[in-house]
Image: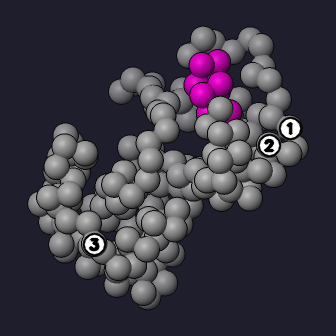
Amino acid sequence: MDDVVAELRSPTVTAADLAGRVGGTDLLDEVIDRWSEYAQAAAQAAASGGGALDAGMAAYLVAVVQVRTHWYGALGHSSSGGEDFRAFLAGPASDVLGRDLVRHLLNRELAGMSSPVYPWVGWVSNAELRAAVARGLPDVPEGLGPDDEEALSRLVAAVARAASGGLDLLGVYA
């Protein structure tokens, strides 16, 4: 996470660095077109304590996360499955990993900036991940549907792997 915060405070990534890595949506394409403007605004926001981001600045933050971090894996849902996915996060995922851990993974400030609008970015520190593992990560509960069971197994594995590797875990809901 330190690389992301450093990039937000003092931008070095250029729009050309993003070629082939992000894009494909109107919002991210707009961010790439206005990259310098967003980078400057992010640096000013980080210097002044941050604040809530609009959709364009949140998409810039997502792009920075994608460039400055290592992708581990993804959980997904169909275009009509967002409500069920959020219910999964609020229910089984929070039951197994803890409500605060899941909440922080979905939306937590970086360099003082937070995204109250889509897309959302969050993170969990390695100390928090190690604490979750030390409390014991229970087995995936029985009775979940196959999609929820697979998603929860993946999420638990990401938490355990990041904890044991000394890494923070960043989450992007985009």
Percent x, y for residue 53?
39, 67
Q: Is residue 156 above or below residue 42?
A: above
**Marks 3 and 1, how far apart at CA:** 40 Å
Q: Secondary structure at mark 1?
A: loop
Q: Is residue 83 above or below residue 42?
A: above
The answer to which quarter of the image holds residue 23 is: top left
Pointer 2 or 3: first along the chain: 3
Residue named by callout 3: 12
**Marks 2 and 1, how far apart at CA:** 5 Å
Q: Residue at x 75, y 22 (%)?
A: 140
Is the magenta region chiefly helix, strand or loop? helix
Q: Amino acid at mark 3?
A: Thr
Q: Is residue 46 magenta?
A: no
Q: Which mark is residue 133?
A: 2
Q: Nearer the viewer, mark 3 or mark 1?
A: 3
Whether pointer 2 and pointer 1 mark residues with C-beta atoms closer than 8 Å, the reply is yes
Q: Residue at x 30, y 61 (%)?
A: 60
Q: Amino acid at mark 2?
A: Val
Asked if residue 132 can be seen in this view, the reply is yes
Residue named by callout 1: 136
The answer to which quarter of the image holds residue 78 is: top left
Q: Secondary structure at mark 3?
A: loop
Q: Residue at x 18, y 72 (%)?
A: 36
Asked if residue 118 can be seen in this view, the reply is no
Q: Is residue 19 left or right of residue 70?
A: left
Which span of residues is magenta-colored? 149-156
Pointer 3 or 1: first along the chain: 3
Whether pointer 2 and pointer 3 mark residues with C-beta atoms closer than 8 Å, the reply is no
Q: Residue furthest right?
A: 135
